[in-house]
Image (cartoon, helix red, strand yellow):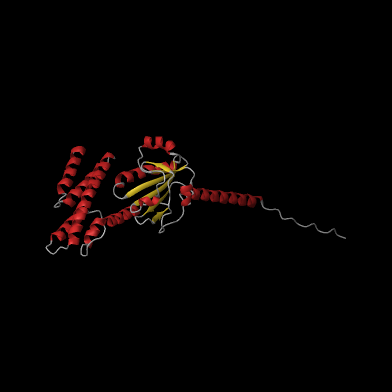
């Protein structure tokens, strides 16, 4: 009787095993890389369109006081930045924060930063060394960041004049300028019927043309008391805005950007020609020429 056949055991091809092993390793590396890349991206709660969660600051620097709240800035545009002092990625974003603070801090923007872990005494030497003057709220326990579910830093939010989040997890400058335009309209307040074009000039930041239109309307014999009062209110607002814009030109000059400074002040002089502020705008342009040369 023939001996029963032994079962045949299939042996895997050595080349196939090696290929599959290499593939699994490659997939694992790719997966870990994707996770690492994802974890390195700034991330917080997606709150766009919602009312910004309230924050109460335990302490701070550069104008932030103990017990102050985020809602105390309602009516202005807030660029809210969560960061770490010793994070290289965070540090790369701070020069822009300082620049925006200097250029627009008197034009309706609050660059409000929240730094994790450190106290004011620990932060003060760093801020002074780097020359950073933007407001800093200290978040030693991370409770403030937790309100926005911040997992990675830096993470930024842009908050509009109505206190609602315009952008979550980022701060594109075009959105920032859109929000500042809304601030100017809100600051202008009620506009009499028939002067809607004045509102649009103010929205664009062109106070000189706005002044001319409002002045012409107020000078009309049939002008109402509302129109005359509006003209007087705009006169005061435009004078303040001219001072702020001239200071912005000085900031650009200090930042070694004379061409931008000149373009700004030339636009101011041209825009305010024929208004009560013409001489002041022209003087600012002449002063720039004396300082910058030419």
- Number of callouts: 0
Observer-nearest residue: 168 or 165? 165
Residue 185 percent across, percent down from the top left: 28, 57
Q: Is residue 183 visible?
A: yes
Observer-nearest residue: 195 or 11? 195
Residue 119 percent across, percent down from the top left: 45, 39
Q: Quadrant of residue 162?
A: bottom left
Q: Quadrant of residue 206?
A: bottom left
Residue 6 percent across, percent down from the top left: 80, 57
User: From the image, which quarter does the N terminus lie in?
Assistant: bottom right
Observer-nearest residue: 289 or 54? 54
Horizontal side of 79 relative to 264 (left or right) equals right
Name the residue: 21% across, 46% down: 265
Q: Is residue 209 visible?
A: no
Name the residue: 21% across, 53% down: 207
Horizontal side of 222 relative to 32 (left or right) equals left
Observer-nearest residue: 228 or 287? 228
User: From the image, which quarter does the C terminus lie in?
Assistant: top left
Name the residue: 21% across, 55% down: 233
Residue 178 percent across, percent down from the top left: 32, 55
In the displayed image of the protein, which residue is found farthest to the left?
221
């Amino acid at each position: 009787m023939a001996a029963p056949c032994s079962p045949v055991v299939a042996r895997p091809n050595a080349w196939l095993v090696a290929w599959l092993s290499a593939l699994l390793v490659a997939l694992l590396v790719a997966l870990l890389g994707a996770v690492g890349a994802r974890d390195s991206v700034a991330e917080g709660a997606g709150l766009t369109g919602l009312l910004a969660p309230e924050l109460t600051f335990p302490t701070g620097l550069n104008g932030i006081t103990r017990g102050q709240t985020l809602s105390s800035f309602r009516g202005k545009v807030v660029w809210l930045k969560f960061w770490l002092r010793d994070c290289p990625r965070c540090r790369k974003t701070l020069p822009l924060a300082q620049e925006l603070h200097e250029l627009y801090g008197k034009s309706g923007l609050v660059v409000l930063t929240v730094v994790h872990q450190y106290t004011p005494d620990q932060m003060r030497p760093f801020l002074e060394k780097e020359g950073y003057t933007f407001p800093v709220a200290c978040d030693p326990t991370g409770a403030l960041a937790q309100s926005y579910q911040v997992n990675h830093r830096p993470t930024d939010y842009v908050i509009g004049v109505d206190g609602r989040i315009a952008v979550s997890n980022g701060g594109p400058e075009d959105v920032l300028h859109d929000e500042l335009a809304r601030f100017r309209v809100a600051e202008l307040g009620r506009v009499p019927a028939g002067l809607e074009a004045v509102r649009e000039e103010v929205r664009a930041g062109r106070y000189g043309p706005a002044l001319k239109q409002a002045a012409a309307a107020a000078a009309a014999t049939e002008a109402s008391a509302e129109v005359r009062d509006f003209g007087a209110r705009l006169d005061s607002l435009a004078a303040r805005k001219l001072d702020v814009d001239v200071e912005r030109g000085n900031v650009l000059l200090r930042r070694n950007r004379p061409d931008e400074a000149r373009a700004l002040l030339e636009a101011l002089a041209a825009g305010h020609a024929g208004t009560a502020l013409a001489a002041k705008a022209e003087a600012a342009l002449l002063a720039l020429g004396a300082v910058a040369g030419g």
